Image (cartoon, rainbow, N blue to C red):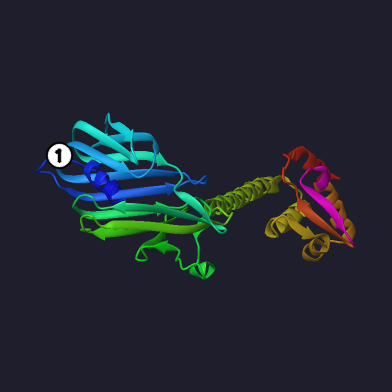
């Protein structure tokens, strides 16, 4: 293992002699299948002509850019994978690649583990591990008897981006040659917080659309009021006030019409396609129709004359 880290030290991030590494950040995103997407960013205080990165695993889908420009680099595997970029001119080099087989089963949980080594002096090093959608760090109580905590080193900070949970470790001026062994234990809860958000958003949109539809229907009914008979107008105004549904007995009481007259008025409104009558036990519910038909004023005049 000692020889392996010496190899890593030789292969990781070489640059011109007057350039120093100021920031080394690694973002690791764990997928549902246990694979991981890596983004490693090396930032220097000066332009470098050569950069390389070492990963203690086989990797795929390698993409490298320098100051936002794609770079042609060579990847070779021997105990680990080295990515070498020669003939470049950049102050920030970004390595992106995929790594498998870093997640293993631990009882009913999932364990992510990876050993880093500080092979070059750097002002600041940051490692972030992001867990799959619907996953959460295991509570320490569930790990009782294992001797493990939910993540190590224990000074890591847990957070969320609104969809996924992550842990971040930050090292200021880490010691050259220092080993940084990180792990995190998580479980898949089966509930995707983003899906919950989508469902809530959909319900809000549906409620909004229903409200808009009712407002437009209410406005259309109001536009019809001037062409209705006095009796029909009073019934429709009550329905509008009661948000489109009212007991027929309420109409009798509030209009002070006789029961037969209220029945005639309601039957006329039904014929016009403006309301429905629904019998529930011993009472009749009068409801505004969802689709309000246009009323011909000539029909209204003929009824008034009768």
User: Residue 171 or 250: which is nearer the viewer?
Assistant: 171
Q: Residue at x 34, y 34 (%)?
A: 63
Instruction: Indicate left or right for 144 with 124 as reference.
Output: right
- The image quadrant of residue 39 is top left
Q: Which residue is mark 1?
A: 47
Secondary structure under tag 1 reads strand
Q: Residue 196's x, y, as percent?
A: 56, 54
Q: Residue at x 31, y 33 (%)?
A: 75
Q: Residue 263's x, y, as percent?
A: 87, 55
**Image quadrant for the C terminus?**
top right
Count up the numbered dots: 1
User: Residue 30 or 246: which is nearer the viewer?
Assistant: 30
Q: Residue 145's x, y, as percent?
A: 52, 70
Image vertical order of residue 91 relative to residue 174, above or below: above
Q: Residue furthest left?
A: 18
Instruction: Indicate left or right for 132 with 204 as reference.
Output: left
For residue 279: magenta? yes
**First to last magenta residue range:** 270-281
- The image quadrant of residue 282 is bottom right
Instruction: Indicate left or right for 156 with 231 as reference.
Output: left
Q: Residue 287's x, y, as percent?
A: 77, 53
């Amino acid at each position: 293992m000692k020889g392996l880290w010496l190899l890593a030290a030789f292969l990781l991030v070489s640059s011109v002699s007057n350039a120093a590494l100021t920031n080394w950040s690694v973002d690791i995103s764990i997928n549902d299948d246990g694979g991981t997407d890596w983004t490693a960013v090396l930032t220097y205080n000066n332009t470098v002509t050569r950069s390389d990165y070492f990963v203690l695993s086989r990797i795929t889908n390698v993409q490298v850019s320098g100051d936002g420009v794609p770079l042609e680099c060579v990847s070779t595997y021997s105990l680990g994978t080295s990515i070498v970029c020669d003939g470049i001119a950049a102050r920030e080099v970004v390595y992106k690649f995929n790594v498998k087989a870093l997640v293993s089963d631990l009882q009913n949980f999932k364990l992510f583990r990876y050993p880093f080594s500080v092979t070059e002096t750097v002002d600041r090093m940051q490692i972030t591990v992001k867990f799959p959608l619907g996953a959460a760090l295991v509570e320490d109580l569930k790990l009782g008897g294992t001797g493990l905590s939910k993540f190590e080193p224990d000074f890591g900070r847990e957070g969320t981006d609104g969809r996924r949970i992550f842990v971040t470790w930050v090292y200021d001026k880490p010691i050259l040659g220092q080993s940084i062994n990180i792990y995190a234990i998580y479980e898949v809860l089966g509930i995707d917080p983003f899906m919950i958000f989508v469902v809530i958003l959909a319900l809000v949109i549906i409620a909004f659309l229903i409200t808009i539809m009712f407002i437009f229907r209410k406005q259309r009914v109001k536009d019809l009021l001037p062409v209705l008979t006095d009796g029909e107008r009073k019934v429709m105004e009550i329905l509008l006030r009661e948000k489109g549904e009212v007991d027929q007995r309420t109409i009798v009481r509030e209009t002070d019409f006789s029961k037969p007259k209220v029945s005639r008025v309601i039957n006329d409104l039904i014929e016009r396609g403006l309301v429905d009558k629904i019998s529930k036990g011993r009472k009749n519910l009068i409801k505004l129709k969802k689709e309000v038909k246009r009323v011909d004023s000539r029909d209204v005049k003929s009824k008034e004359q009768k």
